[in-house]
């Protein structure tokens, strides 16, 4: 079971709903992104323009729909750091109940060449401190 050192509230917008009144599956990816950026700002003091990375893999498991919510809570953890990538786990919670679990792999890149580069030591240190 993943321990989550960070959670943030993400607004559920009207346009996030499908015709059945449930949050559309595609909207959850945006919720994960918003939570990821909040995690970096809170735990790593990263500026958005310093985040030279791309999402290389995303795995999402849906357990129950979210309907009629004003916001959801998204919990985030860094679960692994490799040479040029790191893995994050997520839970999207609706009133305390897990609606979605997800995992993403981000690859750090050199903006000029677009090629992967090592995860900066400052990022590694920030992840270790946040997860301690």
Image: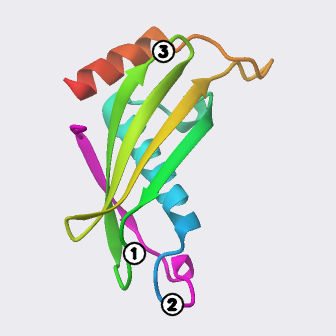
Q: Which residue is mark 2?
A: 20
Above or below — where is 57 with respect to 23? above
Residue shown at the point (54%, 74%) measured from the top left: 24
Q: Position of residue 71 (x, y in %)?
A: 34, 71
Mark 3 Cα shell of 10 Å, populated few (<14), some (14-19), many (≥20): few
- The answer to which of marks 2 and 3 sits earlier in the sequence is 2
* Tag 3 residue: 82
Q: Which mark is residue 31?
A: none
Was residue 4 drawn as part of the magenta stretch in this picture? yes
Residue located 62% across and 27% down the image: 52
Q: Quadrant of residue 45?
A: top left
| SS for dot 1 | loop
Number of numbered tags placed on the structure image: 3
CA separation in Å, label 2 and label 1: 10 Å
- Quickly name the residue at label 1: 65
Would residue 63 be found to the left or right of residue 96 on screen?
A: right
Question: Looking at this view, is 51 or 106 the one in front?
Answer: 106
Disc number lying in front (3 or 1): 1
């Amino acid at each position: 079971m993943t321990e989550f050192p960070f959670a943030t509230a993400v607004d559920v917008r009207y346009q996030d709903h499908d015709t059945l009144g449930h949050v559309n599956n595609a909207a959850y990816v945006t919720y994960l992104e918003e939570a990821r950026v909040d995690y970096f700002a809170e735990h790593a003091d990263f500026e958005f323009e310093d985040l030279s990375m791309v999402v290389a893999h995303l795995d999402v498991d849906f357990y129950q729909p979210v309907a009629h919510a004003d916001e959801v809570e998204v919990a985030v953890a860094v679960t692994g750091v490799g040479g040029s990538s790191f893995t994050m786990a997520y839970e999207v919670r609706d009133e305390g109940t897990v609606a979605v679990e997800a995992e993403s792999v981000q690859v750090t890149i050199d903006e000029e060449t677009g090629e992967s580069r090592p995860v900066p030591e400052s990022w590694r240190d920030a992840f270790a401190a946040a997860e301690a």
